[in-house]
C-alpha cells in the first residue's frame, strides 16, 4: 500500500537563520520551474515504486509542505499540489499543512493556498520581540506575525499553528512569558515550541565558539519548558507531545503519523521516508537532489533496515514523546518505580509547584511480559512535563529493560 502521509521538502529560504542547520538553498529568486520539474520526476518515481498506476491507487490522508520555506513559492504553491494530484488523490478530509514565514503571508498567497486545498498553516513566528528576531537573523519583525494571522484567517484558515523558540541566551533578556501571552492572544489552534540548540556549522555555533554568546543552561531550559506547560495548559491547550500543544481535537495529524510509527513518504532534498521496517532519506544538497533527478536516477542517499529491537526502541522513544505513552508489562513497571519516586526533587528548585514525578501509569498491569505487549492486557506509561525534560534518559532506561528480551 502506498503511504498515506506525504512530506514535501521545499528547500528555499531568503537567508539562513542563525540557529538553522536544515537542508536549505538560499535564493534571492525562487527557481520554481526547476524545482517543480524535479519534484514531478521524484513523485512519478515514487508512484512507480509503490505500483500506484493511477491516482485512484494512492490516497493521501495528510500532506505536509515543509522546509526550508514553502511559503517562498507564493502564489505558485498550488502547482506543487497539482504535481501531487498527478500521482495521488488527496483525500477530501486530508490535513494539508504549509510551513510559512510571516513575511510571505499576503492576501494573494494565502487565498491561493486555501483555494488549492491547503487547510493548515504552521507559522514560523519564533518570538514577538523584534530585537530577538533580528538576533536570530529572521526576515520578519514582530508586528508581521499578527498581520499574517489576520490575513490567513481572512483567507479562510481555521487551523493555524505558531512556532516559538525558547531557552534563548540570557543575555538577550527575552521575556518568554510575554511571548507566550502574545501567541495566546492570537488564538492559534496549535503551538510548537522548540528549545534553542546550538548545531555545528551554524552562525550561532560560531558566535558561541568565539565567546560572543552563552547558551542557556539546563535550568533555564527546564524553567521555560515548565512555564510553557503551565501557561498554555491554563489557556486550554493540551500538551500532547513534548514540543506540541493544541486545542482539543486539533493535534497535528501529519506529525502524529510519525510518532505513531505509520508509514510515510518524503520527497525533496533531505526528505525521509519510512515503510514500517526501513527508513531512507534523500541527498540533502539541493543541487545534488536536482542533478540526480535530472539524470533520471534515484535521489536516495541511504537506507537503514530496522530490526525488531530497533523498531521496539523506536516505539518506546516515539511513544514517550507523546501523551499516548507506551504500554508496559507488570515486571517492567516494578523496574520503573524509581522514576516515579525521583522526579520531584530534580526540578522543584526552579520555582514551580513540584509535579508528581516523571511518569504516570494507568491501566491494569499485564501478568506476563511478552516482547511486544501491544494488544495484551497492559498498563500505559506516559511522561509528565517533568519526565519530558528527561525524555532521552527515560527512553534509554526503558529500552535497556526491554533489550534483555532480545539477548
Ligand atoms: S526560515 Fe526556517 S528553514 Fe529557513 S533558515 Fe530559517 S529556520 Fe532554517
Image (spheres, rainbow, N blue to C red):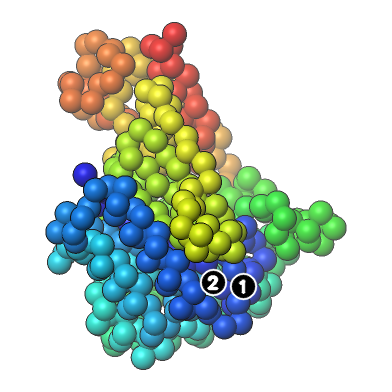
Viewer-closest of 377 and 107: 107
Q: Is residue 65 left or right of residue 351?
A: left
| 188, 159: nearer the viewer | 159
- Disc 1: which residue: 26
- The single residue placed furthest to the bottom in the displayed view is 108
Measuring from the top left, give residue 23's x and y in whole percent. Answer: 57, 59
Task: Work out which quarter of the rendered image holds the C terminus and state it.
Answer: top left
Residue drawn 41% across the image and 12% down it: 406
**Under tag 1, what secondary structure?**
strand
Q: Which of 305 and 233 is in front in this view?
A: 305
- In the image, is the residue at mark 1 within 8 Å of ligand 1 by its beta carbon? yes
Point 47% across, 78% down: residue = 32
The residue to which callout 2 is attached is 12
At which x and y percent is residue 121?
Answer: 35, 72
Mark 2 neighbour density, 10 Å: few (under 14) some (14–19) many (20 or more): many
Ligand 1 visible in quadrant:
bottom right
Which of the 4 quarters of the picture holds residue 206?
A: bottom right
Q: Looking at the image, which residue is at 52% across and 78% down?
A: 31
Say if disc 2 is inside 8 Å of ligand 1.
no
For the question of whether residue 38 can be seen, the reply is yes
Please tell me which of labels 2 and 1 falls first in the chain: 2
Whether residue 342 appears in this view of the structure is no
In the rendered image, the vertical position of residue 365 relative to residue 124, given as above or below: above
Amino acid at each position: 500500500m502506498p503511504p498515506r502521509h506525504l512530506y514535501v521538502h521545499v528547500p528555499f529560504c531568503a537567508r539562513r537563520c542563525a540557529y538553522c542547520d536544515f537542508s536549505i538553498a538560499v535564493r534571492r529568486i525562487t527557481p520554481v520551474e526547476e524545482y517543480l520539474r524535479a519534484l514531478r520526476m521524484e513523485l512519478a518515481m515514487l508512484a512507480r515504486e509503490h505500483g500506484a498506476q493511477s491516482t485512484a491507487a494512492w490516497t493521501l490522508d495528510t500532506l505536509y509542505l515543509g522546509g526550508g520555506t514553502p511559503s517562498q513559492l507564493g502564489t505558485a504553491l498550488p502547482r506543487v499540489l497539482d504535481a501531487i494530484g498527478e500521482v495521488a488523490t488527496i483525500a477530501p478530509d486530508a490535513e494539508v499543512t504549509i510551513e510559512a514565514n510571516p513575511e510571505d503571508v499576503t492576501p494573494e498567497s494565502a487565498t491561493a493556498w486555501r483555494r488549492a486545498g491547503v487547510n493548515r498553516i504552521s507559522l514560523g513566528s519564533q518570538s514577538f520581540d523584534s530585537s530577538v528576531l533580528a538576533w536570530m537573523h529572521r526576515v520578519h519583525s514582530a508586528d508581521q506575525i499578527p498581520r499574517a494571522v489576520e490575513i490567513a484567517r481572512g483567507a479562510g484558515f481555521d487551523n493555524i499553528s505558531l512556532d516559538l523558540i525558547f531557552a534563548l541566551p540570557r543575555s538577550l533578556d527575552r521575556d518568554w512569558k510575554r511571548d507566550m501571552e502574545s501567541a495566546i492572544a492570537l488564538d492559534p489552534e496549535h503551538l510548537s515550541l522548540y528549545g534553542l540548540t546550538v548545531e555545528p556549522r551554524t552562525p550561532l555555533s560560531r558566535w558561541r565558539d568565539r565567546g560572543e554568546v552563552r547558551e542557556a543552561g539546563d535550568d533555564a531550559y527546564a524553567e521555560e519548558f515548565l512555564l510553557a506547560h503551565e501557561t498554555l495548559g491554563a489557556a486550554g491547550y493540551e500538551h500532547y507531545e513534548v514540543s506540541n500543544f493544541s486545542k482539543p481535537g486539533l493535534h497535528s495529524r501529519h506529525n502524529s503519523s510519525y510518532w505513531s510509527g505509520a508509514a510515510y513518504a518524503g520527497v525533496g532534498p533531505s526528505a525521509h521516508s519510512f515503510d514500517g521496517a526501513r527508513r531512507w532519506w534523500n541527498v540533502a544538497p539541493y543541487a545534488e537532489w536536482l542533478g540526480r533527478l535530472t539524470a533520471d536516477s534515484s535521489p536516495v542517499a541511504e537506507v537503514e533496515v530496522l530490526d525488531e529491537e530497533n523498531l521496539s526502541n523506536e516505539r518506546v522513544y516515539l511513544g514517550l514523546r507523546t501523551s499516548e505513552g507506551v504500554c508496559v508489562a507488570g515486571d517492567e513497571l516494578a523496574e520503573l518505580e524509581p522514576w516515579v519516586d525521583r522526579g520531584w526533587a530534580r526540578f522543584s528548585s526552579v520555582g514551580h509547584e513540584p509535579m508528581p514525578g516523571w511518569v504516570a501509569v494507568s491501566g491494569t498491569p499485564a501478568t506476563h511480559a511478552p516482547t511486544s505487549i501491544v494488544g495484551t492486557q497492559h498498563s500505559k506509561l506516559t511522561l509528565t512535563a517533568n519526565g519530558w525534560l528527561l525524555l532521552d534518559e527515560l527512553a534509554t532506561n526503558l529500552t535497556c529493560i526491554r533489550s534483555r528480551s532480545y539477548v
